[in-house]
Image (cartoon, grey):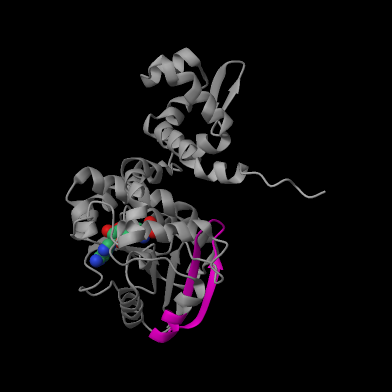
Amino acid sequence: MTEPVTPAAIFQLGMGFWGSKTLLSAVDLDVFTELAAGPLDLDALTLKLGLHERGARDFFDALVALGMLERNGGLYSNTAETGLFLDRNKPTYVGGLLEMANHRLYRFWGGLTEALRTGQPQNEIASGGDLFATMYADPQILEEFLEAMTGVSLGAANAIAAAFPFDRYASFADIGCAQGGLTVAIANAYGHLSATGFDLAPVGPIFEKYVRGFGLSDRVSFQAGNFFCDPLPEADVLIMGHILHDWNLEQKEALVAKAHAALKPGGALIIYDAIIDDDRRENSFGLLMSLNMLIETPGGFDYTGAECIGWLRKAGFTQTRVEPLGGADSMIVGVK
Ligand SMILES: C[S@@+](CC[C@H](N)C(=O)[O-])C[C@H]1O[C@@H](n2cnc3c(N)ncnc32)[C@H](O)[C@@H]1O
């Protein structure tokens, strides 16, 4: 018997922003951080979070129905995932990305139709300006953005630490390191490595504070610079995570060529992004990330593994390969 055709999947996706926004508000309100201390009943949780009683029960039960909370005998508690990844007090916290999504992207994605018609960003630089200079002029946006990058990259960082043979190298530099989530994950996994985080000057204090928190300041340092006009740090391995997708084709190729020029023979470049499958029909996160670049940047876009390998080979890299990292991200490796 053939399945009846219904609009269920269309409504599920079309109204998906209800569920998404419910989760974003839960992170914003610290629901998961409060519940990390132990289960609470409706009244206690409502009071702790300072919510009005009218929506509280529906809000918590919607989170139960969405698989983000559990409820047993009237007591709400975190699931295994939300307890590990959305408790602000744990080093495994990845909610920074969701905080930024709540405060910035949720609003800016309201302009998607306009972006599709005009090709223009819909964020803080909708009427012109440089994205990073504009964002970093506001200390709160700066800190939230850099923390969000740790959230989006921690899974990929751990997968890269496990998959790449860092034991054959003495040093690496994380180009566009943001808060340092990946830099720290790799330095933690390989005690012999020295590391440089390279990024725009305003990032320095936030990177250095994060590194200090892990007791790694003796072998992880920060180098301020602009990767379009300043020399890249000297290191055996250069890493560019979620960098290329911010820029247009010419800028992408210039960054890959610059990395090649900066490495010594035998050195390696690792690029990771939400790499789109070559047939452009599977990795919906990568394709949506590319639309996010439409909303956020003047010329950025995400790309397939085949496209990226083409840029690496053109710059002179050999032994190029694409390796999936478990989630939406893949890494692309080339050797000089
Ligand atoms: C999308 S974030 C990626 C952060 C991190 N690598 C990750 O994967 O989570 C881009 C980073 O590039 C940095 N950046 C942007 N323009 C830069 C430039 N011209 N020179 C150096 N860093 C830059 C930003 O400050 C930011 O930290």
Residue 236 horizontal/vertical position (percent):
39, 74
Q: Quadrant of residue 270?
A: bottom left
Res 316 seen here = no
Where's ligand 1: which quadrant?
Answer: bottom left
Specify the farthest residue to the top.
43
Front residue of 177 and 211: 177
Q: Quadrant of residue 71?
A: top right
Residue plotted at (43% across, 25% down)? 34
Specify the farthest residue to the right.
1
Residue 331 among those drawn in magenta? yes
Front residue of 328 and 260: 328
Residue range highlighted in magenta? 310-333
Residue 233 horizontal/vertical position (percent):
28, 71
Q: Quadrant of residue 28?
A: top left
Residue plotted at (24% across, 72% down)? 228
Q: Quadrant of the C terminus?
A: bottom left
Residue 65 horizontal/vertical position (percent):
58, 30
Front residue of 254 and 181: 254
Front residue of 264 and 286: 286
Q: In this view, does 90 lie to the left or right of 123?
A: right
Look at the picture and state if 175 lies above or below 268: above
Residue plotted at (19% across, 54% down)? 134
Res 2 seen here = yes
Residue 249 among those drawn in magenta? no
Look at the picture and state if 76 lies above or below 291: above
